[in-house]
Every structure is written in structure tokens, then in C-alpha cells.
Image (cartoon, helix red, strand yellow):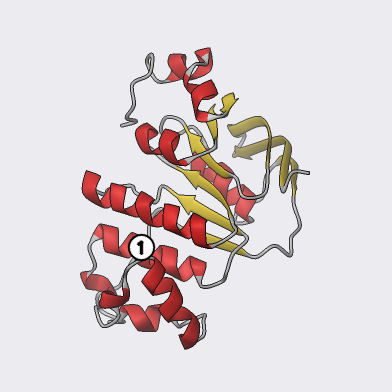
Amino acid sequence: MPLINIENLNYNISNKEILSNINFNVKENDIVTFIGPNGAGKSTLLKIIAGILKQTAGKVIYNKKIIKGYVPQHFYVDAMLPMSVFDFLIIDSKKQNVSEITNLVDIKDLYKSDMATLSGGELKKVLLARALLKRPQLLFLDEPTSGLDIASESDFYNTLNKVKKNYDCTILMVSHDLHMVMASSNKVICMNKSICCQGSPSDVMASNGYLKLFKHGEHKIV
């Protein structure tokens, strides 16, 4: 039985169609990644499923008591309001939970660092750690490696693999790097306002919808 069902979902802003007739399901412990060009509606769809936005029409069906964690694409850190990584992490959590998670994502050495001094890769891992402190059953990641160099991007996905091995959670993710997506996901949804194709990475890469959208297999969205 699917963990999540999306049925005939549409989303409009001021009569402009952003998402059209979206249908798919997600099974427990899936890693599902949404891919597509800029403006395809990927992040919007993720936010609707996470409950941050409300669809114009259609259904998002899953148990609303499920614990969710969300890692945003952008996170503003105010340098005028200094805060250590440790203080940031314990805002919504107990201290005893922090050590386990920070060891898992390898950021314990950042405890005393000011949030405003973190590199892009460090900040992404801190945000991931904060989301994991809730012990989510559903983890949403919106462009988690956006703006990172190749080394930091690879490090983040390695961390995500460790998370998946240690916790039973279902992951829904938006990503721009097709190489990493195909290696780390068991289901890929290719979209451009509507769904072009969906399935296993190998099935999607062989589909006409994918080849047409990404210029016959070009593996980087810019």
C-alpha cells in the first residue's frame, strides 16, 4: 500500500498554471527525486506535499500524523544575530538527541561555530541534522546541493546514504544534478509542469520524455 498518493493535483497562481494533472504514489522507504528544468514546478510540488503550500485542485493523501522533516533550498542566516550551531540545533530538540545525529552527519566539530561562518556544504548538513532531530518518517529536501561544489555535493549525498541506512524514512527530493539523482534514487519523476515520465532511474533515462526534456541525456541542468 502506498505511503503517499497524489491524485489529479493542480496548482495555479493568479490564473497561471504552475502544476497540471499530477498523479503518482510513493511507497514506504522510497527515495523519490523530482527532476526538470527551472520553472518546472518541482519545488512547488514538494512544498504542497509537505503541507507548506495548498494545491488549487486534486488530492494529497497520506497520514497527516506522520512526522515530517524539511530542508529548504534557501536559508537566511543573520550575521547580526550570532548563534552557534549547537544552539541552533537544540532550539526544537533535546540535547541528548543532538550528539547522535551530529555524529551521523559528521558535524560535531562545528558545535561552537557561528552559523554565519559556515560554508555552503556545512550549512546544508546542519539543516539536514536539524530536520533529522525530529526523527521524521518523511524527509523533504529542496535542492539540497544547490550552489555546492562537486566535492561538497558528493559529501552530502554520502551523508544522505548513511542517514538512509540508519533510519527508516521515506525521502522526497528536488535535485538539479542528474548523475547523483540516478545513483541515489529508486524512483525518479521527470516533470515540466506536468509529469513527463516516472519510474526507476533506468526506465526514466530510456524514456522519450526524459530524452526530449534533457537534450538526449545531457546530465546537468543549468
Q: Image check: 8 left or right of 146?
A: right
Which residue occupies the foreground of this view, 9 or 135?
A: 135
Toward which corner of the image does residue 19 lie, by quadrant?
A: top right
Residue 211 image offset from top left, x and y in percent: 44, 15
Residue at 64% from the left image edge and 39% from the top image edge:
11
Q: Amino acid at mark 1?
A: Lys
The furthest residue to the front: 165
- Looking at the rendered image, the quarter that the C terminus falls into is top left
Q: How many marks?
A: 1
Residue 43 image offset from top left, x and y in percent: 50, 44
Residue at 76% from the left image edge and 43% from the top image edge:
59
Identify the element where label 1 is drawn: helix
Q: Is residue 60 shown above or below 97?
A: above
Q: Image check: 45 left or right of 142?
A: right
Q: Image check: 70 left or right of 29?
A: left
The furthest residue to the right: 1
- Looking at the rendered image, the quarter that the N terminus falls into is top right
Label 1: how many Cα within 10 Å (few below 14, some 14–19, many 20+):
many
The furthest residue to the bottom: 95
Residue 89 image offset from top left, x and y in percent: 42, 78
Q: Is residue 33 shown above or below 140?
A: above
Q: Is residue 87 shown above or below 176?
A: below
Residue 199 image offset from top left, x and y in percent: 59, 28
Residue at 31% from the left image edge and 64% from the top image edge:
123
Q: Is residue 199 shown above or below 162?
A: above
Toward which corner of the image does residue 21 lie, by quadrant?
A: top right
Which residue occupies the foreground of this view, 206 or 43?
A: 206
Which residue occupies the foreground of this view, 212 or 26?
A: 26
Q: Give the residue at mark 1.
A: 125
